[in-house]
Image: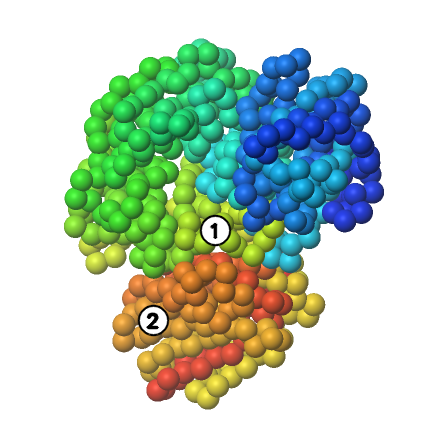
Amino acid sequence: MRRNQMRIMKALGLSLLMGLSSLANAQDTTFDTRHLANEQNILSVQVAQKYLLLPVEDNAPTGKVVIVVNNRPVGEAFDIRLARQHVDYYVPVDLSNYLGKTIAVDIQGLPASAICWKNIRFSEMFDQTNREKFRSTYHHTPAYGWMNDPNGLFYKDGVYHLYFQHNPYGSTWGNMTWGHSTSTDLIHWDFEGDAITPDAWGAIFSGSAVVDHENTAGFGKGAIVAFYTSAKSTPWGGSQSQSLAYSLDNGKTFIKYDKNPILTSSEPDFRDPKVFWYAPGKHWVMMLAVGQEMQIYSSKNLKEWKQESSFGAKQGAHGGVWECPDLVELPIEGTKEKKWVLICNINPGGPFGGSATQYFVGSFDGKRFVNETPTETKWLDWGKDNYATVTWNNAPDGRCIALGWMSNWQYQAVLPTLQYRGTNTLPRDLSLYKHDGDYFLKSTPSPEVEKARGERQDFPSFKVSDPYEIESLLPQNDGAYEIEMTLHNDGASKIEMSLFNEQGEKLLMYYDIPREQFVMDRSESGETNFSENFPAITVAPASDTDKIHLRLFIDQSSVEAFGEDGEYVMTNRIFPSSPYNRMTFHADRGSFTIQSLHIYKLK
């Protein structure tokens, strides 16, 4: 959720008043446009206002834009799908450094007949008004443009910082930068603009950030040091290396290290550095995803790194490339013991197709990780839509707080939104629990989520033997709410519950008691025909089915189910035509009792 729109305007100079169609505050400027051969175009203009607004058509072919000042390119060229037949939305190019000057814009890959030429504008402001009915209310989304992996999560001075893979020039993948959002409560987010942008070494891919409390890198005590993958594309292929940038203003702006890249490899997949301090050895650790393994490095000063070991052979799922690693030490509930958990994101190869997150539980001595159950594959989330999960550095009170990207690479590019594409999961506090002699990860909604609760509806206890319906979950239901229920099984072999809307679209959930499973079916949940991979049935193990505690978080276009305080979690995107506001219950053979049922409107 985005908070404090005036602060956003101050940070970006963006207006919430200028509509897409009216462009009321834009200047209708006549540009000197020259169309050259092979769809190359030169736009000459005197910069009159802060933003150059470029019209985008989401399904158009990709072109390229270069800003030219005094016959020299300024910054890196960026890819953009400029409008040819119609305008879907606008994106801003900040030219405030050239106000009053005449510059050139080199636009490549766009025919002279495109409607783009009649729709380019200058403006002091950029419209950020939400025009998407599927935009989340209490989950983080980008203000505009494409978003995938969360990056560089750190906490300092009461503020949570979230960076993310961002394309500021469209709602499709490309031009990877680190977008930046901040929050004081993990629910309300302020967009702070783009913090780290592409350079000569390539696009800015995923990574992490640390608070260097003891000035081990020499940039200053308490400096924020960010690590990211520089991804370089060339006509001969591509390469990936690791780079460093540091911030002396708590992550608002970054200075790139002049000796980048700091770590290179001949491997084509060499990315996503996760860095943390290993206190017993008094050194830093870097986890890197390399093909289908994780490599572990150590450093004393964050600049020079030594490879210590690798992990991955014959461990877990290998249906795709390993990505976005994390390594955290977690407490085991009910004991004073701790164990290490290695988080490994994989694409494809998830249990229900596409991308997913697996994990391993074991020991770590600062150089080598050992998995205690090498023959078993464990999944962090049993839905289709939790990927690139990573944790916050320097989180308060010793907590381990995780965040994922709420999507799947199978269909992210065609989700039914235009103004933006990309949503994050709820923040989740991680811990371990023991079951049948083995250790498993528990993901609990972070307690800050409860502070977002507003209006509450309570329902008296009822028994379900025949079909039972609640006709209205909330008055004035806007699609953002939490359902918390406790139920007792009285011999039913199947405990079924469904959410409905006025159009008859439904989200089906049930407990299969003989199989000890929690199941979710979104095949009739709303809009699903944008991808053959989207209609899906997802299944989670649920061993305790006598007395069940379940929390469901619904937010416009997503559902997150947390069973038994997070012992099993299921995250799925949904796109209903209108909010679900009816709920039905059904039992096969026998009955069950809903002992408590609370519905909270979430703000």
Image quadrant in which the C terminus is located: bottom right
Nearer to us: label 1 or label 2: 1
Residue 229 location, quadrant: top left
Residue for point 44% across, 82% down: 586
Name which residue type carries label 2. Answer: Thr
Location of residue 435 with respect to 487 vertically, above or below? above
Disc 1 versus disc 2: distance between alpha carbons? 34 Å
Mark 1 Cα-neighbour bin, 10 Å: few <14, some 14–19, many ≥20 = many
Q: Nearer the viewer, residue 118 or 264?
A: 118
Name which residue type carries label 1. Answer: Gln
Location of residue 462 with respect to 61 vertically, above or below? below
Residue for point 59% across, 53% down: 417
Q: Which residue is mark 1?
A: 412
Residue 319: x, y in percent? 26, 49
Location of residue 464 with respect to 26 vertically, above or below? below
Q: Nearer the viewer, residue 252 or 431?
A: 252
Residue for point 27% across, 25% down: 266
